[in-house]
C-alpha cells in the first residue's frame, strides 16, 4: 500500500524487456507511442487533463441542466402568452378595425391599456415593440 | 518534491474513494447527464405523443347549453367583449383550411400548390409538429398564409383540464414564436367540425379560449380527405352549395395526403371557374365585416397584412424561449434516434456474443473432453507454485495446506510482500517440506510475482493468490497443456467459495458464465485477454521473454496475458483445474475490486494499443482479440444499462406488455446461456434464481464501475492497488467438501 513512485522495478526483467521491445519494434513513431508506458498507463501527474476534463464536464453538466430548465419552462407553464397579446379586440369591436387599419407591427391592440405598470421589466407584458430592444439585451 | 506531492495527491484520492464510493463532482455530473437524457427522452416521447397521449374523442353529447345562434352561425366564433359572436364566410369565397401540419413531406407540397395557384390557405398547426419542423412554418408564413393553433399534442380538449388546455395552447404559441416569430389568435379544436357539432362539453372550452382572445374556427364543408375517398369525392364534398362561401377542411398531415394533393389544384380551378375567390380566415372576417363591402378585392391581390391579421409579432422573450424550445427539440430529435441506433448495435452485439459463446463453448467442451484428446505426453515434471502474500494471515495456512495435498510434484514459493501481520511466520511454522518463503520489502503484487519467477527452480510457474485454495489435482490439470510447446500460459477455472450471500451468488453466476462461456470462446479464438490472478500457469521463459509482470497497469494479469499473445505464445483454458477463491463479500469491496479490474483492463488494452497495426501474432491479437475485448468488456457493458432505461421508457410510455416481453426475452436468453454454463461446470442450478435480480442490480453496479474507471482513465488520476479484506472463510472447509457441496 505504498505509493507507487517508490516501487522499484526489478532491473533484470526490465532490461530484458527493453531489449525485447527494441528488437520487436523498430521505428521511431512506435517507440514514441510506447513512451508513456514508462510510467503507469493513463496517469497524468501534471493534472492538466483532469482540469480540462473537469471543465468539459462542468460544461456538459450545465448544458444538461440548462436543457432540463428550458423544457421545464416550456412545458410546466413557465410561460404563458398573455391574453392582451392575443385579443384582436382590445376594447369591443376593434377587431373589425384592427386588421384593416393597424399594421401587424403594432402588435398591441390600439387600446393597449392592458399594459402593466410601466418600467417593470417583467417578461410577460414586454410585448410592445418599444420594449423589444431592452428585452433582447435582457435575454442575451 | 514532485514525488512527495504526487504521493500526497494519491493518498487524498484513496481517502476519497474510501469515504464515498463515487467522488462527488462526478456523481453530480452523472446525475445531470441522467437528467438531460431523461428530459430528452420525455420530450421526445411527448412530441411523438407517446406521453400524455389521450385518444378519447367525444361524440353524441347533448348541446343544451350552447346558444342556438352559435350552433346555426358561421364558422368563426369569437367573444368580443365577452359576448359570443359568429361570422360567416361571404358568398363566393373559399377559406382553405389545413389541419394537423406541418408535415415534412406533405405540407411543402400543399404550399407549392397554393403558390402555383396564387391562393392563400389557413393552416391549423399542431405544436409538436411545429417544433419538429419549424422551417415549414416559416415558409408558410412568409408566403402569406395564415396559421392558427391546433393544440400541441392533438387531444380532444373537452376531456382535458383547464390547465392542460392552457398549456396546450401556450406551448403551441411558444413553438410558433420560435419558428416564425409570431403568435396567432386563431384556434381550431382537434376533432371539431361544423358549428352544430359543438356540445355541452366543448362549449366551455371555446368560451374560455374566447375570453383569452382566440377566435375558434369551424368549418362549413369537409373534404373528408383523411378517409382517402378518391379525388372526385374530395372535390364534391368540399364544394359548398348555391354559391355560398365556405370554410373548407383539408389535411396536410397525418398520413398519405397524395389524394389531397391531387384534388387541391382541381378544386381550386373548379371554384375559380365558378367565380369564387380564395382568402384566409382573417381575410374572410374582414370581408364579412359590416360596412366593409363584401368581396371587394379579388383573391391573391389582397394585401398580405389583411390576410394575416391574426398574426401578432411575438415579444422578444417569448421568441427566445420558443427558439430554446425548438433547439431542445432539435437536440432530442437527433439524439434519441442516435441512441436508438447505438442501442440496436449494442443489442445485436450482445445477442451475437451469446450466440458465439454458446457455439464455441460447446465446441470447446466437446473438443477438450474427448476421450482421445491430449495435449501431448503427460506433463509430470515438477513445477513451482508462486504464492504472493501480503497480510494473508487468515488464509495462508489453508492455501498452503491445500497445495501440500497436490498430486503433482511442486515447489511452493511464498513471496512475502512485506506483510506486517506475520504471514511469513505462519507459512514457515506450518512445517511443510516443499514450502520456501522468500521475503521482500513491500513492493506490490507484480514485484512479488517477478521475485517468485526469478527464484523459481522449475520451468513451469503456477501463480495463485494468497487467498485461494486448490484441489489436489488442480496443478496437474493446470499444467497438462504445456505438453504443447507453443503454449505459453494456461488459465485455470476459478470458483467462488463464499456463495451463500446474495453478492456471493451473483459473483458465482458471473464467474461460472465468465469461465465457461467467455474463456472457452476466447480460447478457441486464441485471444484470451486475462489469465486470472487466482489460478494461472506460465512457462518461465515466456514470462521472462515479455519482461515479467509489469507495474504499468493495475491488472498485471491482463497485461502479461496480452504481452504473451503478442510475442506469439498461445494461451489456453484448462477447465478441470479448479481454484476456490473468496469473492468480495460487501458491495464496497466488490466496487473496489471491479474498479481495479476494469481500470486495469483498460490500462492494459491501451498499453498494447500498438498491436493493432503490428504484424504477426501481435497484429493478430490487435486485430482480432483487441476489438472483441473492447466490444464485449467495455462498450457493451457501458451501454447495456441504456437498454434498461429505454425498456423502462417503452414500458411506461409506449407499450407495456410488448416492452416487458422483450425484456423478459432477453432475460430468457441470458438465463439459457447461464444454465448452459452451469451445465458445463456441473454446478447447481438453484443459484440461477438470483439471475433476474442480478440483471436489475448487479449490472448497474458494474456499469457505474466502468463509467467511473473510464473517467478516471481520461482524467489521468492515480489509482492504487486496494487490498480486499479477507476473512479466511474459503480456506476453512476442506476443498473436497467444498467441491461436493457445489455439486
Image (cartoon, rainbow, N blue to C red):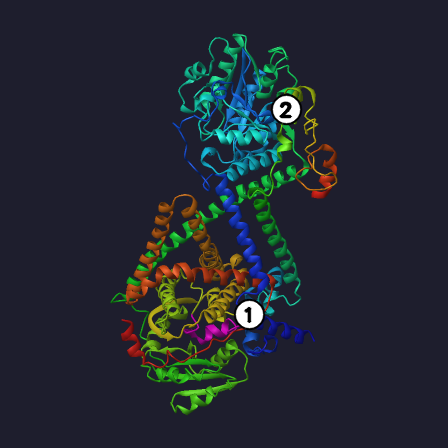
Judged left or right of residue B172, residue B304 is right
> Which quadrant is the C terminus of chain B positioned in?
bottom left
Asked if residue A26 can be seen in this view, the reply is no
Looking at the rendering, the stretch of residues picked out in magenta corresponds to B532-551
Residue B440 x/y as whole percent: 53, 85
**Residue B57's mark?**
none
For disc 2, the marked residue is: A92
Looking at the image, is B60 positioned above or below residue B3? above
Q: Quadrant of residue B148?
A: top right
Asked if residue B334 can be seen in this view, the reply is yes
Observer-nearest of B612 and B680: B680
Residue B408 x/y as whole percent: 33, 81
**Residue B17's mark?**
1
All told, the count of numbered labels is 2
Q: Are marks 2 and 1 in contact (CB under 8 Å)?
A: no
Residue B266 x/y as whole percent: 49, 14
Same subunit, labels 2 and 1: the answer reads no
Distance from label 2 to label 1 (Cα)?
70 Å
Amino acid at each position: 500500500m505504498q505509493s507507487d513512485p517508490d516501487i522499484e522495478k526489478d532491473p533484470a526483467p526490465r532490461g530484458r524487456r527493453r531489449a525485447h521491445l527494441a528488437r520487436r519494434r523498430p521505428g521511431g513513431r512506435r517507440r514514441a507511442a510506447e513512451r508513456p508506458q514508462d510510467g503507469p498507463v493513463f496517469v497524468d501527474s501534471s493534472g492538466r487533463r483532469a482540469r480540462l476534463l473537469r471543465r468539459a464536464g462542468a460544461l456538459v453538466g450545465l448544458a444538461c441542466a440548462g436543457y432540463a430548465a428550458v423544457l421545464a419552462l416550456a412545458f410546466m407553464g413557465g410561460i404563458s402568452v398573455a391574453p392582451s397579446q392575443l385579443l384582436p379586440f382590445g376594447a369591443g369591436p376593434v377587431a373589425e378595425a384592427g386588421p384593416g387599419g393597424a399594421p401587424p407591427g403594432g402588435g398591441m391592440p390600439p387600446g393597449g391599456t392592458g399594459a402593466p405598470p410601466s418600467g417593470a421589466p417583467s417578461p410577460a407584458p414586454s410585448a410592445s415593440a418599444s420594449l423589444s430592444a431592452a428585452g433582447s439585451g435582457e435575454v442575451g | 518534491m514532485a514525488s512527495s506531492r504526487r504521493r500526497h495527491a494519491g493518498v487524498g484520492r484513496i481517502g476519497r474513494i474510501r469515504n464515498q464510493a463515487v467522488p462527488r463532482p462526478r456523481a453530480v455530473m452523472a446525475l445531470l447527464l441522467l437528467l438531460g437524457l431523461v428530459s430528452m427522452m420525455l420530450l421526445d416521447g411527448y412530441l411523438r405523443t407517446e406521453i400524455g397521449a389521450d385518444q378519447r374523442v367525444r361524440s353524441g353529447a347533448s348541446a343544451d347549453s350552447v346558444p342556438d345562434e352559435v350552433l346555426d352561425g358561421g364558422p368563426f366564433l369569437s367573444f368580443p367583449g365577452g359576448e359570443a359572436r359568429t361570422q360567416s364566410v361571404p358568398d363566393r369565397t373559399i377559406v382553405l383550411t389545413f389541419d394537423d401540419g406541418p408535415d415534412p413531406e406533405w405540407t411543402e407540397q400543399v404550399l407549392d400548390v397554393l403558390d402555383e395557384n396564387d391562393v392563400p390557405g389557413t393552416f391549423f398547426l399542431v405544436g409538436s409538429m411545429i417544433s419538429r419542423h419549424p422551417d415549414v412554418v416559416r415558409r408558410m408564413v412568409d408566403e402569406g398564409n395564415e396559421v392558427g393553433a391546433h393544440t400541441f399534442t392533438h387531444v380532444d380538449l373537452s376531456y382535458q383540464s383547464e390547465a392542460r388546455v392552457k398549456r396546450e395552447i401556450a406551448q403551441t404559441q411558444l413553438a410558433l414564436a420560435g419558428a416564425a416569430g409570431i403568435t396567432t389568435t386563431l384556434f381550431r379544436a382537434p376533432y371539431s367540425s361544423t358549428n352544430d357539432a359543438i356540445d355541452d362539453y366543448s362549449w366551455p372550452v371555446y368560451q374560455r379560449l374566447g375570453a383569452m382572445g382566440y377566435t375558434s374556427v369551424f368549418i362549413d364543408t369537409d373534404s373528408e380527405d383523411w378517409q382517402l375517398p378518391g379525388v372526385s369525392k374530395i372535390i364534391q364534398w368540399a364544394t359548398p352549395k348555391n354559391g355560398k362561401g365556405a370554410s373548407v377542411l383539408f389535411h396536410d398531415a397525418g398520413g398519405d395526403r397524395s389524394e389531397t394533393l391531387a384534388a387541391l389544384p382541381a378544386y381550386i380551378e373548379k371554384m375559380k371557374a365558378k367565380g369564387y375567390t380564395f382568402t384566409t380566415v382573417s381575410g374572410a372576417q374582414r370581408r364579412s365585416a359590416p360596412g366593409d363591402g363584401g368581396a371587394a378585392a379579388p383573391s391573391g391581390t389582397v394585401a398580405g397584412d389583411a390576410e394575416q391579421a391574426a398574426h401578432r409579432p411575438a415579444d422578444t422573450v417569448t421568441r427566445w424561449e420558443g427558439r430554446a424550445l425548438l433547439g431542445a427539440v432539435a437536440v432530442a430529435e437527433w439524439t434519441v434516434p442516435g441512441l436508438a441506433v447505438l442501442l440496436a448495435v449494442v443489442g445485436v452485439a450482445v445477442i451475437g456474443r451469446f450466440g458465439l459463446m454458446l457455439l464455441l463453448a460447446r465446441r470447446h467442451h466437446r473438443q477438450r473432453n474427448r476421450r482421445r484428446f491430449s495435449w501431448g505426453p503427460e506433463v509430470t515434471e515438477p513445477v513451482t507454485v508462486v504464492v504472493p502474500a501480503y497480510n494473508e494471515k487468515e488464509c495462508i495456512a489453508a492455501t498452503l495446506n491445500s497445495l501440500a495435498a497436490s498430486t503433482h510434484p511442486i515447489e511452493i514459493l511464498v513471496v512475502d510482500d512485506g506483510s506486517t501481520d506475520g504471514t511469513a511466520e505462519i507459512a514457515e511454522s506450518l512445517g511443510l517440506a516443499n514450502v520456501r518463503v522468500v521475503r521482500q520489502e513491500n513492493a506490490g503484487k507484480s514485484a512479488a510475482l517477478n521475485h517468485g519467477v526469478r527464484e523459481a527452480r522449475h520451468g513451469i510457474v503456477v501463480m495463485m493468490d494468497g487467498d485461494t485454495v486448490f484441489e489436489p489435482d488442480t496443478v496437474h490439470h493446470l499444467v497438462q497443456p504445456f505438453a504443447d510447446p507453443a503454449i505459453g500460459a494456461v488459465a485455470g477455472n476459478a470458483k467462488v467459495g463464499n456463495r451463500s450471500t446474495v453478492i456471493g451468488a451473483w459473483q458465482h453466476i458471473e464467474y461460472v458464465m465468465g469461465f465457461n462461456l467467455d474463456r472457452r470462446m476466447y480460447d478457441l479464438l486464441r485471444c484470451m485477454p486475462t489469465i486470472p490472478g487466482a489460478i494461472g500457469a506460465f512457462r518461465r521463459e515466456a514470462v521472462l521473454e515479455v519482461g515479467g509482470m509489469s507495474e504499468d497497469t493495475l491488472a498485471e494479469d491482463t497485461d502479461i496475458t496480452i504481452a504473451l499473445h503478442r510475442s506469439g505464445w498461445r494461451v489456453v483454458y484448462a477447465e478441470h483445474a479448479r481454484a476456490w477463491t473468496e469473492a468480495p463479500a460487501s458491495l464496497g469491496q466488490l466496487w473496489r475490486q471491479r474498479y481495479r479490474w476494469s481500470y486495469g483492463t483498460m490500462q492494459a488494452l491501451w498499453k498494447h494499443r500498438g498491436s493493432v497495426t503490428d504484424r504477426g501474432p501481435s497484429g493478430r491479437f490487435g486485430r482480432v482479440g483487441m476489438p472483441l475485448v473492447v466490444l464485449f468488456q467495455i462498450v457493451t457493458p457501458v451501454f447495456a444499462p441504456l437498454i434498461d432505461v429505454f425498456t423502462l421508457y417503452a414500458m411506461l410510455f409506449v407499450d407495456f406488455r410488448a416492452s416487458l416481453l422483450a425484456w423478459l426475452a432477453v432475460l430468457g436468453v441470458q438465463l439459457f446461456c447461464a444454465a448452459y454454463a452451469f451445465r458445463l461446470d456441473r454446478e447447481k442450478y438453484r443459484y440461477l434464481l438470483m439471475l433476474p435480480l442480478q440483471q436489475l442490480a448487479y449490472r448497474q453496479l458494474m456499469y457505474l464501475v466502468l463509467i467511473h474507471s473510464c473517467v478516471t482513465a481520461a482524467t489521468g488520476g492515480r489509482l492504487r492497488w486496494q487490498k480486499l479484506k479477507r476473512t479466511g472463510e474459503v480456506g476453512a472447509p476442506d476443498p473436497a467438501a467444498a467441491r461436493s457441496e457445489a455439486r
